[in-house]
Image (cartoon, grey):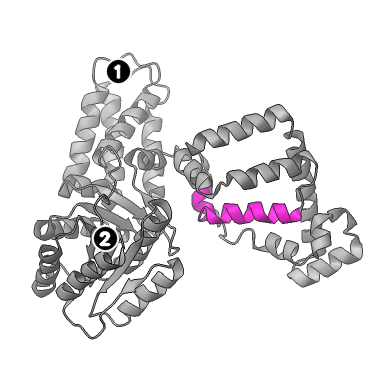
Amino acid sequence: MFENLSDQLNRSFKLLKGQGRITEINVAETLKDVRRALLDADVNYKIAKTFTDQVKEKALGANVLSAVNPGEMMVKIVHDELVDLMGGESIEINTKANPSVLLIAGLQGSGKTTFSGKLANLLKTKRNKNPLLVACDIYRPAAIEQLKVLGDQISVPVYTEEDNKNPVKIARNAIKHAKKEGYDAVVIDTAGRLAIDEEMMNEISSIKKEITPHETLFVVDSMTGQDAVNTAKEFNDRLDYEGVILTKLDGDTRGGAALSIRSVVNKPIKFVSAGEKMDALDVFHPDRMADRILGMGDIVTLVEKAQEQYDVVEARKLQKKIAKNQFNLDDFLSQIQQIKKMGNIKDLVAMMPGMGKALKNMDVDDDAFKGIEAIIKSMTPVERTNPLILNGSRRKRIATGSGTSVQDVNQLIKQFDETRKMMKMMSGKKNMARMMGNMQGMRR
């Protein structure tokens, strides 16, 4: 997402490079391109105009006229305005009550059911909650079965009344069940509906009125662009929901919904979702999204993802093995699997400053480690522990077993040797103590 917008904004800022100071003329030229970039990203015209007017006002302020680097100053001003446009700060969902009732609403095909599963997973793994999923979509074929499958994947129970065709009663009974069985979070998946479908809108309104949820969350398919913003407004007029969820950010989307929704409905974007994996759900941070839009990467999110997979005890064991030069291919495989748990490889690399543009036209396969894993798993336990015994015949057997070539096996062994040497060099007591201290500090 935002690739085209990022490119166009960066081209706009180049107009100010080499300028001695910011003037009304060069600001007007730059903001003309900025406004065009926002419109191309499917941002509402009035919002784009208001945005550029505010940037112009700040850029022409007396404290900016003598700026040493007008281009960098303009980037900062646009960054700050983007953050404000998207809400200024992240807003958490309300899960203080016991049980916390979370009602999920949205259009057909927006990804509500998948989001419900992701939200339950997040509550369980990152909020230490004991969630219950509730199936209130009684219309879509296999909707209840889909929620059950998702529930099985994340080991979260699903409350159903498959013979009951009244979603209001199902929701009410589910909350009673949650209180009785000790569930402290209830995620209610409702049927997808069209804003113009009066009967369906009345139904979701009735559910909300009956159960008085602590949060009503509206799920939006970000690929629908400005239409998503218009729909969000219509739903908000009926439901007065607490927050917006943007799904399918990994699709071919221009980003207009993310930039426009807050201004139109005055409700925060609370989560963003990309991909089908149950852990592919992130709290929305306006400042981090602004960083990514302007090609600055998102190091904070990258570090957080790494911390989620970080295990202090395992790290200490690994430290001892490295110090004794006992780091082997089993350890190497384990580290690869930790990286894979962090998420989509291309998305992770794009969080590094400057890498988003570099990856624009590259096809980074999410199975980039597949060949390496196959090679290591084709080795015997002894070979993984002691790669020095890997002679020509062993390497040929491993290549055949992993569906790779001998050259691929040779390259992996070479990379492993280089990695082990580098880790050995870093294994001095001062270096490792500093590293451990830093990692433990980040955990706090």
Closer to the camera: disc 1 or disc 2? 2
Q: Earlier in the sequence, mark 1 or mark 2?
A: 1
Query: Is residue 170 toward the left or the right of residue 332 in the image?
Result: left
In the rendering, at what x and y percent does residue 191 appear? 23, 73
- Residue 342, position in %: x, y? 52, 52
Asked if residue 292 lies in the magenta stretch, the reply is: no
The residue shown at (63%, 29%) is 434
Q: Is residue 89 above or below residue 56?
A: below
Q: Residue at x 75, y 44 (%)?
A: 321
Instruction: Using the image as rendered, state which of residue 325 and residue 173 is in the foreground.
Output: 173
Q: Identify the main secondary structure in magenta.
A: helix
Reply yes or no: does residue 332 show up in magenta.
yes
The secondary element bearing badge 2 is classed as strand
Q: Residues within 10 Å of mark 2 (few under 14, many from 20)?
A: many
Lateral position of residue 245 relative to residue 202, left or right? right
Q: Quadrant of residue 18?
A: top left
> Which of the pair 422/103 is nearer the observer?
103
Q: Are marks 1 and 2 in contact (CB under 8 Å)?
A: no
From the viewer's perspective, is residue 224 above or below residue 81?
below
Left or right: residue 272 versus residue 275 is left
For label 1, the SS is loop
Q: Is residue 360 visible?
A: no
Res. 424 visible in picture:
yes
Q: Amino acid at mark 1?
A: Val
From the viewer's perspective, tell me whether residue 425 is left or right of residue 388: left
Rendered image: mark on residue 199: none
Q: x%, y% of residue 393? A: 90, 66
Residue 7 is situated, as x and y percent measured from the top left of the image, at 41, 43
Magenta stretch, residue numbers: 329-348
The residue wearing badge 1 is 64
The residue under label 2 is: 219
Q: Residue at x 27, y 42 (%)?
A: 86
